[in-house]
Amino acid sequence: QVQLVESGGGLVQAGGSLRLSCAVSGSIRSINNMGWFRQAPGKQRELVATITSGGSTNYANSVKGRFTISRDNANNTVYLQMNSLKPDDTAVYYCNTVPPWRINFHDYWGQGTQVTVSS
């Protein structure tokens, strides 16, 4: 059993900040690489930030320098600090293992959290 519960989204003006949280439970362990993905209306889901079990991070060019991914293994939580938000950051944000966790040959996703950035 695996559960990914994202929270922290909301409506923010351009230039503002949000901090997303992802509570992880079940078979996902601290050894798993984790990531934040996002899906904007009419677009494919994309990976925007990753963090390894050792804490190494990587970012998509579109968010580099503005977003910071982190993890608290003791509390099974992954975070995404988003600063200098732009309208193009508007999307539903999901956390997951990298690559995404699979159940019965299908990618498993939580419910996501909506981020809306107004201009």
Image (spheres, helix red, strand yellow):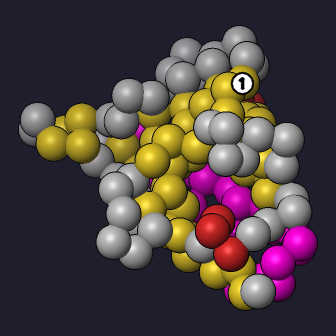
Give SS at disc 1.
strand
* Figure label count: 1
Counting from the top left corner in percent of width and height, residue 63 is at: 72, 47
Q: Inspect the image, locate mark 1, and give the three-letter code of the amino acid beneath it.
A: Thr
Which residue is farthest left? 104
Across and down, in percent, residue 94 comes to: 50, 56
Mark 1, Cα crowd under 10 Å, few <14 / some 14-19 / many 20+, is some
Look at the image and tell me whether residue 77 can be seen: no
- Circle 1 residue: 57
Where is residue 44, by image quadrant?
bottom left
Q: Is residue 8 magenta?
A: yes
Residue drawn at x 79%, y 57% is 82
Q: Main secondary structure of the magenta part?
A: strand
Q: Residue furthest top?
A: 54
Q: Is residue 3 above or below residue 51?
A: below
Residue situated in front as seen by the camera: 77 or 96 = 96
Quadrant the N terminus occupies: top left
Horizontal and vertical percent position of residue 20: 71, 60
When asked about the image quadrant of residue 105, the answer is: top left
The magenta segment: 4-26
The residue depicted at 85 percent of the width and 41 percent of the height is 65
Q: Which quadrant is the C terminus positioned in?
A: bottom right
Q: Which of the 4 image quarters holds residue 43?
A: bottom left
Is 53 situated left or right of 96 in this image? right
Question: How far across and down, in percent of the image, does residue 110 sit?
Answer: 40, 59
Q: Is residue 95 visible?
A: yes
Q: Is residue 50 above or below residue 92?
A: above
Q: Residue at x 40, y 75 (%)?
A: 41
The answer to whether 111 is drawn above or below residue 3 in the figure is: below
108 inside magenta stretch: no
Residue at the spot x=73%, y=87% of the render?
A: 118
